[in-house]
Structure formats: structure tokens, C-alpha cells
Image (tube, rainbow, N blue to C red):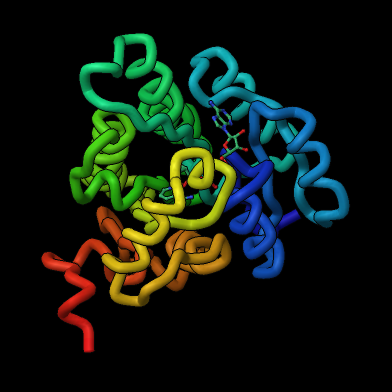
């Protein structure tokens, strides 16, 4: 078999599931990774060309087993989408070490571990890493001491990967989504937060899972063959605007 294989973490729902579906439409085969076995089993049913693998990206031994299982099943890995993430918003003084670690475990350690374990397979295919950070990694905000810091670290990790892995033909890029109405976001976005985002975002709305997936799949593809070390905000313009005063709109 020769079609390209992508490994997508956090694929049971949200942006990871939308990315899986778009990659399949584009002719890829997809290893869908998630630690939520029930949701992954439901999500993967009926997606031709995708297979579910239940693993936790924050556990080093589990990550090694995951890469072995995917390689044994598909025989190659051409792209890794490090999308699994958790959101936990809280004030600095209420963010104890356990809370901080819970966010870092998945959002930062997970990206490091999965990328690291996939390097031998990606060297064989001259493949691509696409790491999912967030606008919270580009701009600081209240309540995001752990989440925002984990995502800023993913942006820097991507640049480190691009710097070191380029000589093997491996590209590494980062997508920073703006707000999308997924389970993750809706758990931490109150109506006030939703309204404030609408005011501050030039396009005046949340993004869709599909709009984020379009950017991710482009970076996985050969169309992006000379693109590495880049950070792309798919955020309706949020990152590029300094003062988003609603009163300044006509
Ligand atoms: N939704 C947004 O507004 C938004 C904005 C910016 C960035 N992001 C980022 O996009 C990515 C996807 O977010 P989403 O909104 O689709 O979230 P989601 O909660 O809908 O999906 C995340 C998936 O990751 C899985 N997961 C979490 N931790 C895991 C682990 N340790 N191992 C394996 N699987 C794990 C969950 O089970 C879930 O299925 C995350 O990295 C998130 O931080 C989302």
C-alpha cells in the first residue's frame, strides 16, 4: 500500500476528528489516536481508511507502544498531527502544581513524546509534524497561566523541531486556532467570553473545526513542501489586531 498515512492525536472529536475526515477526503489513511476509548470507537465507525488506537499521549511507554502499533498496522507514517489537548482555565494563585502538571502532561509533554517517538518513521518518509497550539500561546490572557504557557512552549518546540529535523527532510509547523465551539472550548467559554471574542475578532465569529482542519491538512501535504518552522494563526484575525474596540467599527 502506498497512500500516505497520518497519525492524528485527539481524533475522537472536535478539531482532531474534522482533520481526520478531511485527510481521508484527500486520500490519506489515518491512525486516529485518543485516550477516550468509547468516543474514539464511535467516531471511527464508518470512516473508511481510518483505524482507532486507544493511547494516552502523556505517557511515555504508551506513546512508544502507539508508534509501534501504528507502524505495524500501516507500515509507514508520513504526517503526525499533535492535536490532543486539555483546557483548564484558572487564576495563577489557584493553579497548584497538580493542575499545572495536568495541563503540561498532555499539551506539552504529549507533543514532545509523540514527535520524538515518530522521528524514525518520519525520517523514512521525509514526513511532517503539525503541532496544534492556540492563540493563547501567542497572546497572554487572564486565567491561562498553565494553558497559555503550554501552548507558547509548543510554538517554540515546533521551531526547535524544524531547526533540527530539516536535514532529514522532516518539516515541522504549528497551527494556532482561535476559538472553535468544541467540547474543550465550551467547557471554559461562558457567554460573556463568547461575546467578548466576537467583539475582538475581526471576522466577528468563532471558527469551525473544518476551517482549522483545512490549515492542518495543507501543512501535512506536499503543497507545503517548502514550509517549515512556521506558526499560522487560524483565528479570524485575532492575533494580528492590537486594539479590538467594538466602538471603532462602523
Ligand atoms: N476549541 C478551541 O477553541 C481551541 C482553540 C485553540 C486551540 N485549540 C486546541 O486544539 C486542540 C483540539 O481541541 P478541541 O477543541 O478539538 O478539543 P476536544 O476536547 O473537542 O478534543 C480533544 C481530544 O483530545 C483527547 N485527549 C485529551 N488528552 C489526551 C491525551 N493525553 N491522550 C490522548 N488523547 C487525549 C480528548 O479525549 C479529546 O477527544 C487542542 O490542542 C486545543 O488546545 C482548541
Q: Residue furthest right?
A: 46
Residue 27 image position (x, y, % from top left): 69, 66
Residue 11 quadrant: top right
Q: Residue furthest bottom?
A: 250
User: Eyeballing the image, is 127 above or below 88?
Assistant: below
Q: Would residue 112 be found to the left or right of residue 70 on screen?
A: left
Task: Give the camera-side residue of 239 and 194.
Answer: 194
Residue 121 image position (x, y, % from top left): 52, 38
Residue at the image position 27 percent from the left and 56 percent from the top: 231
Residue at the image position 55 percent from the left and 22 percent from the top: 63
| Residue 171 shows up from this direction | no
Task: Give the camera-side residue of 81 and 169.
Answer: 81
Residue 54 image position (x, y, % from top left): 70, 27
Numbered circles on residues, count:
0
Quadrant of the image containing the C terminus: bottom left
Residue at the image position 26 percent from the left and 58 percent from the top: 230
Task: Give the camera-side residue of 140 and 5.
Answer: 140
Quadrant of the image containing the N terminus: bottom right
Q: Residue furthest left?
A: 242
Residue at the image position 29 percent from the left and 75 percent from the top: 202
Residue 66 image position (x, y, % from top left): 63, 26
Amino acid at each position: 500500500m502506498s497512500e500516505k498515512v497520518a497519525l492524528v492525536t485527539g481524533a475522537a472529536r472536535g478539531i482532531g476528528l474534522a482533520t481526520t475526515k478531511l485527510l481521508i477526503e484527500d486520500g490519506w489513511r489515518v491512525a486516529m489516536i485518543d485516550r477516550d476509548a468509547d468516543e474514539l470507537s464511535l467516531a471511527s465507525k464508518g470512516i473508511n481508511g481510518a483505524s482507532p488506537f486507544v493511547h494516552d499521549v502523556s505517557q511515555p511507554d504508551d506513546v512508544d507502544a502507539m508508534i509501534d502499533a501504528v507502524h505495524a498496522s500501516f507500515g509507514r507514517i508520513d504526517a503526525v498531527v499533535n492535536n490532543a489537548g486539555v483546557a483548564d482555565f484558572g487564576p495563577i494563585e489557584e493553579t497548584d502544581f497538580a493542575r499545572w502538571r495536568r495541563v503540561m502532561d498532555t499539551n506539552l509533554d504529549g507533543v514532545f513524546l509523540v514527535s520524538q517517538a515518530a522521528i524514525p518513521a518520519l525520517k523514512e518518509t521525509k514526513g511532517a509534524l503539525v503541532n496544534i497550539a492556540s492563540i493563547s500561546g501567542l497572546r497572554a490572557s487572564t486565567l491561562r497561566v498553565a494553558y497559555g504557557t503550554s501552548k507558547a512552549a509548543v510554538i517554540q518546540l515546533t521551531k526547535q523541531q524544524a531547526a533540527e529535523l530539516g536535514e532529514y527532510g522532516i518539516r515541522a509547523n504549528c497551527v494556532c486556532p482561535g476559538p472553535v465551539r468544541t467540547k474543550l472550548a465550551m467547557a471554559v467559554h461562558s457567554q460573556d467570553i463568547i461575546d467578548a471574542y466576537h467583539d475582538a475578532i475581526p471576522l466577528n465569529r468563532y471558527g469551525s473545526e473544518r476551517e482549522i482542519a483545512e490549515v492542518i491538512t495543507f501543512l501535512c501535504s506536499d503543497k507545503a513542501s517548502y514550509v517549515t518552522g512556521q506558526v499560522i494563526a487560524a483565528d479570524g484575525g485575532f492575533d494580528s489586531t492590537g486594539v479590538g474596540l467594538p466602538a471603532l467599527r462602523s
